[in-house]
Amino acid sequence: MNDNTPAVAQTHAHARVSQCTRVSQCPVLHSFPSPLHPFPVGFVSILPSPHPYHTHHRHTPNTPHTPNTHDQSMARRVVAVVATALVGPVAAGSMMHSHIDAHDRVCASDNSSFTASGVDDVTRLLNTRGVAIVDSCVDQTVLANSCRVLCRHAPQAASQPSPHRTAATPKHVQSTRGRFHRTAFEDDDSKLAVADIRSAVEPFARAFFDASDTQWDDVYLSQCQFLTSLPQSEAQFYHQDNAARGLTMIIPLTSITLPMGPTQLLPGTHALTPTHDNNTPPVSRENAAASIATPPRRSTPQLLRALAQQPTCKAVAHAGQALMYDSRTLHRGMANMSDTPRPVLVLRYDHRATPPPGQGLAYTFMVRMLGAALHTCSYYMAPKQGRDNDVGAPADHASSTSPTIP
């Protein structure tokens, strides 16, 4: 029989209608907003035949629907198909990022355009680029004392703190492998060490919020933590500290070299999530675009294209320097591939009306994917600035003045 005969054509049409009916009756896919008939035949073929429960026993809004074995089997099949479709791209992306991470660990970035010392210059960098490295921010004597006090009980291995920890030993919480956080400072020595560092950096915080006409009384210290990244600690994924405008300060207690896993930032990304209140300068997006490319680019697609061509900032630092960035700037902690811990003090200042984190799981996931995409584009599109012999420059320059970990 010829395939073009009316009988064969009608048979094919009935088969297509039957497949679409089977998909539309699936309780797992019933809430999909898009039409279901364009699904490939291979996807439809895994779905079982209609079950009498779905054709004759429709549940009413007042009758709760209890998934039966058929529903659970259907869900498992759908999950299996989705997972199979994602295995290839995820595996390829993982291999690509492993290659890029290996490059980042040996090639330093040129941070001269982010380095400043005066309050006005630092504020300008924070508003335009979202990142600033402050020279001579903390006195060496204060830094050495803070390092001695805060590092006294720091974990020395990923298995610590041990189960035999005494009440006098401060608690360190491990977020990712080898990355420990201490947020409580009960003893007087620790309180004094933190207060000394705060007095050195708070003038920059005041100027940052003054730029948006924010009263200092409306600003609070949202986080104060001592962070230790041990050797072989894992890298973080890209994230924001807050979806609203705020200021994060990272004060290294020793010199930070590239193998020790400094903070890696995507400059200018703070302008991608503007907040529409008196806590944000109205020209932040324009300034960020103007500082990245000329002529000024104001639209989000143009800003994204400019950001994709920007090198990342790997914030290696001498002892006494401080890293400051807008809390909306995408960043991550790199893996510590050295044999030396990386101790830092982290201070965060936020507006009382917009406490951190200001984002949910879906938003965090989107930011993570955006950061990974911009990082990948930067690797292939931005001019290469780092060289292998730049890796140990900060430590060589400041080895005589850098405090040592007790």
Image (tube, rainbow, N blue to C red):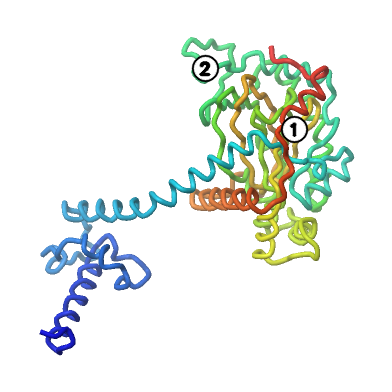
**Residue 351 in sight in this render:** no
Report x, y in % for residue 320. 81, 27
Q: Secondary structure at mark 1?
A: helix
Residue at image coords 65%, 56% = 273
Q: Residues within 10 Å of mark 2 (few under 14, many from 20)?
A: some
Above or below, 126 against 15 in this view is above
Left or right of 326 in this view: 64: left
C-alpha distance separating marks 1 and 2: 33 Å
Above or below, 126 against 403 in this view is below
- Give, as a three-letter code, the residue at label 1: Asp
The residue closer to the viewer here, 403 or 224, is: 403
Q: Secondary structure at mark 2?
A: loop
Left or right of 97 in this view: 273: right
Above or below, 18 against 143 in this view is below
Where does label 2 land, which residue? 160
Where does label 1 land, which residue? 390
- Give, as a three-letter code, the residue at label 2: Gln
Report x, y in % for residue 366. 53, 53
- The answer to which of marks 1 and 2 sits earlier in the sequence is 2
Report x, y in % for residue 309. 69, 55
Residue at image coords 37%, 70% = 34
Residue at image coords 77%, 28% = 394
Left or right of 395 in this view: 160: left
Assign the N terminus to one quadrant of the image: bottom left
